[in-house]
Amino acid sequence: MTERCWVRLSVDLADERGQYLVYTAMALVLVVVLLGLVIDGGFMFREYRRVRNVASLAAQAASHAVDEAHFAATNEVRLDVARATGIALNYAEVNSRGAMEVTRVVVWADGVAVDVEERMPTIFMQVVGIPEVRIAARGVARPRYGIESAPQ
């Protein structure tokens, strides 16, 4: 009886000889997909930080374009729209080295918002039909001035 069970066990194992190959192939595909997501995701995060920094710093630079004539006449801080827009565009162009595009600059009396966008080519996501991703960020800044509270 023991000999019969042993023979049956060996016959059952002989029928399943290729199962490890299938599992290995599936695991390999999963590892390649995860590796691609990690690499492309890391590049996208790095580029998002660059785009965010350019947008924030361009808005900060533009927030210093105070309308001096209006300030001298009324003692009220108000941004010069044309100058602030030009400064934001110039600052973003210089600091992005031409890789990013300023999609919108909004200047109001006491603030400025700069939207910056970059199109980044992908490496592994091209396999699934995504050749590039759009990375966008917004920077907002306001001019700060004077004494705002008593102990200052």
Image (cartoon, rainbow, N blue to C red):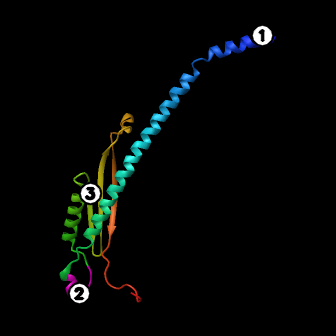
Residue 46, compared with residue 84, is above or below; it is above
Q: Nearer the viewer, residue 85 or 45?
A: 45
Residue 75 among magenta residues: yes
For residue 74, the mark is 2
Question: Quick check: marks 3 and 2 in contact, CB under 8 Å?
Answer: no
In percent of the image, x 32 and y 73: which residue is there? 142
Chief secondary structure of the magenta portion: helix
Which part of the image, by quadrant, shows the N terminus? top right
Residue 16 among magenta residues: no
In percent of the image, x 23 and y 87: which residue is there? 74
Disc 1: which residue: 3
Q: Residue furthest right?
A: 1
Q: Give the quarter of the image for residue 11.
A: top right
In the shown orientation, is residue 138 left or right of residue 87?
right
For residue 103, the mark is 3
Q: Amino acid at mark 3?
A: Thr
> Whole-percent x and y of residue 53?
33, 60
- Which of pointers 3 and 1 indicates the residue nearer the eye? 1
> How far apart in space, not on screen, are marks 1 and 2 (Cα)?
106 Å
> How far apart in space, not on screen, are marks 3 and 2 (Cα)?
33 Å
Circle nearer the N terminus (1, 2): 1
Q: How would you rate the neighbour count of disc 3 (Cα within 10 Å): few for under 14, some for 14-19, many for 20 or more?
A: few
Q: Give the quarter of the image for residue 3.
A: top right
Circle 1: element type: helix
